[in-house]
Image (cartoon, grey):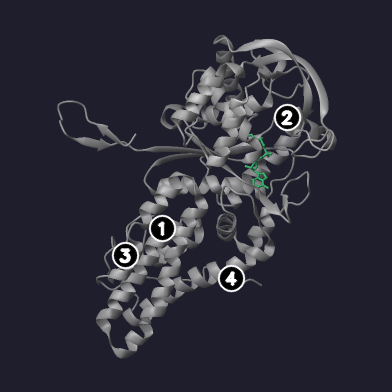
Amino acid sequence: MGLRRQPRGNPGAYSRARVSFYVTTPIYYVNGEPHLGHAYSTIAADILARHHRQRGEEVFFLTGTDEFGEPVAQQAEREGVTPRELGDRLAPRFKEMAAKVNASNDFFIRTTDEGHQRRVQEVVQRVYDNGHVYEGTYEGWYCPRCADFKTESEIVDGNLCPIHKIELTREKQDNWFFRLSAFQEDLERLYADRPEFVTPDFRRNEALAFIRQGLRDVSLSRPTLKWGVPVPWDPEQVIYVWFDALLNYYTALSYARDGEDLTGRFWPAFHILAKDILKFHAVYWPAFLLAAGLEPPKRMFIHGYLLMEGHKMSKSLGNVLDPDEVIAKFGADALRYYCFREVSFGQDGQISPAGFEARYETELANEYGNLANRTLSMLERYRAGVVPEAEPEPELVEAFDGAQGAVRSLLDEAELTQALERIWALVRRLNQYVEKTRPWDLAKAGDEGRLDRVLYGLAEGLRVTSLLLHAYMPEATGKLLDALGEDSRELSEFGAHPGGRTVGGLDPLFPKLD
Ligand code: MSP
């Protein structure tokens, strides 16, 4: 990637091959309505997708729904419908949720897609052909919501799932096994060679500890369940939902575009997920890909939980915030902003309606929104709506120096909160600059030269900051950039734009809440 050498005969010449970036969210179970927890992962991946597009990269962003397996089959049974009916009802809800939070996903996968199932069978067959599958018996404690066996040490309060707090069931089954144990060394080497493979570091250590304690083989199929992708060499059984689900990241590229296989262009992926599904992604998934002779993921970022009154937001706990309600009140931009500002991405963190309101008013409406309106109206009033052609003052040049590079590096690490902090420091810096330079006094005093420099600096600072913020809040920043006469959304350095542009008017970006 990056710079590619030209063929011989053109010595010393380089051409820039377009860098590609592939980002995914977990695919969500269609066993309940989408809630803010799901929206959170989708927004996180979307911010990365949008940011990389702003760098001029070729981006593919995937999200979707996980429709097979016990979690869905059991919910369907409870509701007295077929699992397919349940999926057909709920998958569109998840699709709508993505659209409402302004996710710019390039495809929405449903694991019931024919293209997915076909490709899953091909890959699983390859793992079988490579000798990593055998027939055996498994007995253990099973959580149907997790679709996962629990070890004795994980079980809590007698016989409860540590995540869902529901009774575990004793399951004994003859089925096909994936020889996960054979990949212990490969995984340890992968982790040693690529320290960035799983981040944050404490999650990497957790995954590595799990690997080092010794890996047991895992079920690859379910003999009793009918709702799944048939095992190609034993169609009486279905593929264990986790393998079918994980493979979505790989299969989607093969059929998302008619007549085009995008795998070569985009594989491997950068995965975004929460800590509840760390083991599947950080241990099973790379091992399974290696077993199939495929390249393991590029990297993955494991985020924490959004908590409501101290508890994970989840359908089974019944404490969910409906994204529709939050968006109706605050708008999608504010939701996108708040989640990554309030909760340090990677950690668990509390969110609350009162918290939303406070940040909406102080940061979005006052610090950013007012700065925007003030700057535009001063340009209107003092310079007839034209950005002056002038040199910015050194203190502002300095404040912006290195900012873009810092934000890029942080977002390379998916450090969404730290990057946002860095950007917000620029917003605050610009506000301080207005307070300090008092352009209205300069106008009164007739200090036209300095007023030009100050107004140019403010317009330019707002432009560059809004471009950096654009991935987080596409709507509001888009309106402001339009008003500033900036058509491009590519990231840009302070000072790159000369003056001379005509600016437009702007309604308040974050109007007062009712
Ligand atoms: N279907 C599996 C994932 C398969 S991926 C190959 C699954 N689905 S899920 O519907 O339970 O979604 C779990 C994911 O939703 C979490 O990993 C996280 O990304 C997101 N979240 C659900 N609730 C959340 C919070 N309260 N807070 C943060 N993220 C949350 O597991």
Sequence-wise first label, 2 or 1? 2
Q: Looking at the picture, which amino acid does disc 3 mark? A: Glu
Residue to which mark 4 is pinned: 361
Q: How far across and down, in percent of the image, does residue 210 sit? A: 62, 29
Mark 2 beta carbon near ligand 1 (under 8 Å): no
User: Does residue 244 lie above or below 427 as drawn?
Assistant: above
Viewer-side residue, 411 vs 101: 411
Q: CA distance from mark 2 to mark 1?
A: 42 Å
444 left or right of 11 in image: right
What residue does disc 1 label? 467
Element carrying mark 3: helix
SS of the residue at dot 2?
A: loop
The residue mark sitting in front, 2 or 1, is: 2
* 440 over 65 or under it: above or below: below
Q: Specify whether residue 80 is in view.
A: no
Tell me the quarter of the picture where residue 94 sits. Answer: top right
Task: Give me the disc on residue 147.
Answer: 2
Task: Report the amino acid beneath label 1.
Answer: Leu
